[in-house]
Structure formats: structure tokens, C-alpha cells
């Protein structure tokens, strides 16, 4: 595994690149960044969004979900268990289930149109 990044400016730049790829739903770039910087994989479940949620709670596509799971992101059941004591758990769970259903429905529509 590569040495941890010592330069704070370089570390901040990498974090921005990861955030930009995730927010733009650019799974290819996110995957490439993880391959180039595997030292970020152990942090894949760290809280990063509102209510201290991990990235997987904010996923918007099946492709990005696959990237996160390949990198070791906790599945929803593990994430739900970790969040179950948090006051916003039920809201986050509903949001993730809705997004998962939307992603599945969108994929099914694409497959039917093909």
C-alpha cells in the first residue's frame, strides 16, 4: 500500500477530486482515484454527509454503488445497523430505499427500451 499522503495541500486536493467525482456521479473517475490511492479505501465508511452518514447513503446510481461496494463500503444492512440509534435513521433509511428503488426502476426502464 502506498505511503500516506504527507502534504496537507495534496491531501485536500485529492479529497476534492473524490468529492467532485462522487457528486458528479462519475463512477469511472471515482474508481480510478481509488485504484491510484488505495489508502482511501479504509475510509469508505467514514461519515461524510449530513447526519454523519457514509457515502453509500447518498449514492445515486447502480454504477457508483458497485464502486463503493467493491471498495469495501458497508452494505445497507450494516449501514442501517450502525445508524439505527441515530435520530435521523428512519429518514435516512427511507431516503436510501427510495433511491435504490428509483435506480432499479430507471435501470429496468433502460433495459426494456434496449
Image (cartoon, rainbow, N blue to C red):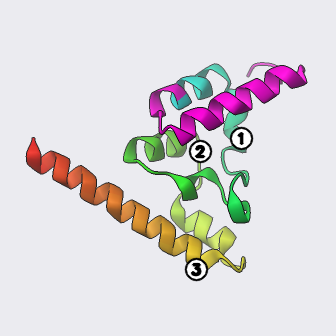
Instruction: State if disc 3 and disc 1 touch (CB < 8 Å).
Output: no
Q: Name the residue under label 2.
A: 72
Quadrant where the C terminus sits is top left
Q: Is residue 19 magenta?
A: yes
Q: Does the magenta stretch include residue 18?
A: yes
Numbered disc 3: secondary structure: helix
Q: Which of marks 1 and 3 is in front?
A: 3
Lower sequence index among marks 1 and 2: 1
Question: Could you say where residue 36 lies in the image, as x and y percent from the top left?
Answer: 63, 19
Q: Which residue is drawn at 25% across and 59% down?
A: 105
- Magenta stretch: give its range: 1-29
Numbered disc 1: secondary structure: helix
The prevailing secondary structure element of the residues shown in magenta is: helix
What's the mark number on residue 42? 1
Front residue of 75 and 97: 97
Q: Name the residue under label 3.
A: 90
Would residue 51 be found to the left or right of residue 11 on screen?
Answer: left
Instruction: State if disc 2 and disc 1 touch (CB < 8 Å).
Output: yes
The CA distance from mark 2 to mark 3 is 24 Å
Amino acid at each position: 500500500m502506498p505511503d500516506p499522503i504527507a502534504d496537507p495541500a495534496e491531501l485536500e486536493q485529492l479529497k476534492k477530486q473524490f468529492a467532485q467525482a462522487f457528486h458528479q456521479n462519475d463512477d469511472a473517475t471515482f474508481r480510478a482515484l481509488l485504484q491510484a490511492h488505495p489508502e482511501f479505501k479504509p475510509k469508505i465508511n467514514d461519515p461524510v454527509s449530513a447526519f454523519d452518514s457514509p457515502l453509500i447513503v447518498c449514492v445515486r446510481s447502480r454504477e457508483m454503488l458497485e464502486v463503493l461496494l467493491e471498495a469495501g463500503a458497508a452494505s445497507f444492512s450494516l449501514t442501517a445497523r450502525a445508524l439505527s440509534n441515530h435520530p435521523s435513521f428512519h429518514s435516512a433509511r427511507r431516503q436510501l430505499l427510495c433511491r435504490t428503488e428509483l435506480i432499479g426502476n430507471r435501470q429496468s426502464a433502460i433495459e426494456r427500451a434496449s
